Image (spheres, rainbow, N blue to C red):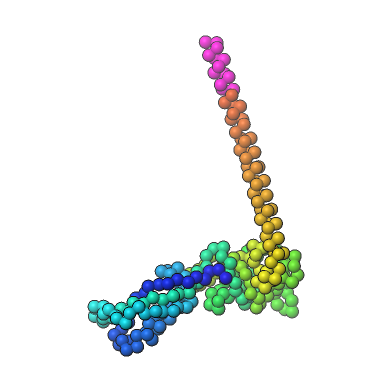
Amino acid sequence: MEGLKECEANLVVYLHPSMAKCVNDAILRELSSLLFTYNETFDGVVLAYDPNVRSNLAKILPGIHPYLGVRLKAKLLLFSPKPNMLLEGEVVKIGRQSIHAVILGFSSAVIADEDIRDEFKCKVKHGKEVFVSRRHKKHKIKVGTIIRFLVKSFDEEILHISGSLAAANTGCARWLDTNLEEWSQADSTTRKRKDRDEKAQKTADDKLMASRDTPSLKKDDRIKKLKKKRKEHT
C-alpha cells in the first residue's frame, strides 16, 4: 500500500533527572507519545519506532529544573498519504450516499457519492446496503470488504481521508487482484477515450481560434490595399 514510508531520525529526548536510573524506559515513554499523531517534522503519522541510543552520556541542560538531553537515532515508520496515492481500508459502513472505511485501524476515510463511479449501483440485500458493479456482478463492496481507493485529501489534525473510487483500478481489492486483466483493459479504454476527447476538443478550439483570426487578416489585407491605392493616386 502506498502512503507508508520509513525514515531514520536523529533525536534528542529530554528527561527529568529523576529518570536517570531508568533512561531506556523514559525514552520509550517519550517516543510512545509520538505514536498515531501527525508530526510536521517527519511529514507523517508515526506508526512505529526502533530507537538506538548513540551514547550513554547525557548532557545536563541548565535551568530552574535541569533536564537531561539524551541523543539517539530512531527508525520510524510513517503514514503519509498524498493526493492520488492508492490506499486500502476495511469498509465499516455503507450508505446510499457514501462509503466509510478504516485504514490501518486508526485513520478514517469517506468516499462520497460524487466520487463513486457510475459503474457501481447501491442495492439493498438482506436489509444491508451493497455497492454492486453494473459490468461485473461479482465485483461488490459491502461492510467488511477491503477496498482500494485514491486519496483526494488528508486532514492531518483529525487523521481523516477523503477518497475516490472514480478510477478503474479502485474498488474491492480482492476482485481487482483476481481480475487484473479485465479492469486494466477497461482503464486503457477509458484513457484512450479521454485522450481522443481531449484531442477533439483541442482541434475544435484551434478551428475556433482560426475562424476568429480570419476576419482580422482579411481586414488587414483591405487596409493595405487601400493604402496602396492612395499612394498610387498621389
Residue 47 appears at what percent x and percent y?
Answer: 48, 76
Point out the residue furthest to the top here.
234
Q: Is residue 131 visible?
A: no
In this view, the residue in front, 72 or 229, is 72
Position of 191 with respect to 10 (left or right) is right
Q: Main secondary structure of the magenta part?
A: helix
Name the spot of residue 118 as percent of width and height, x first. 69, 63
Answer above or below: position of 200 versus 35.
above
Q: Residue at 68%, 75% (x, y): give it.
A: 142
Residue bounds of the magenta highlight: 222-234
Residue at horizontal 56 percent and vertical 65 percent from the top: 85
| Quadrant in the rendering for residue 97 | bottom right
Res 30 → quadrant: bottom left
**In terms of image quadrants, where is residue 114?**
bottom right
Front residue of 200 and 219: 200
> Which of the image's four quarters has the N terminus?
bottom right
Position of residue 54 measured from the top left corner of the image (x, y, whole percent)? 35, 78
Residue that lies at the very extreme toward the front in this rendered image: 55
* Residue 232 colored in magenta in the image: yes
- Judge by depth and name the residue closer to the eye, 53 or 223: 53
Residue found 62% across the figure and 31% down from its top: 214
> Residue lying farthest bottom?
21
**Residue shown at 29%/80% (left/top)?**
58
- Residue 185 sits above or below residue 29 on the image: above
Task: Give how far across and how far down residue 87 sits, in percent.
Answer: 58, 69
Residue 220 is a magenta residue: no
**Camera sees residue 8:** yes
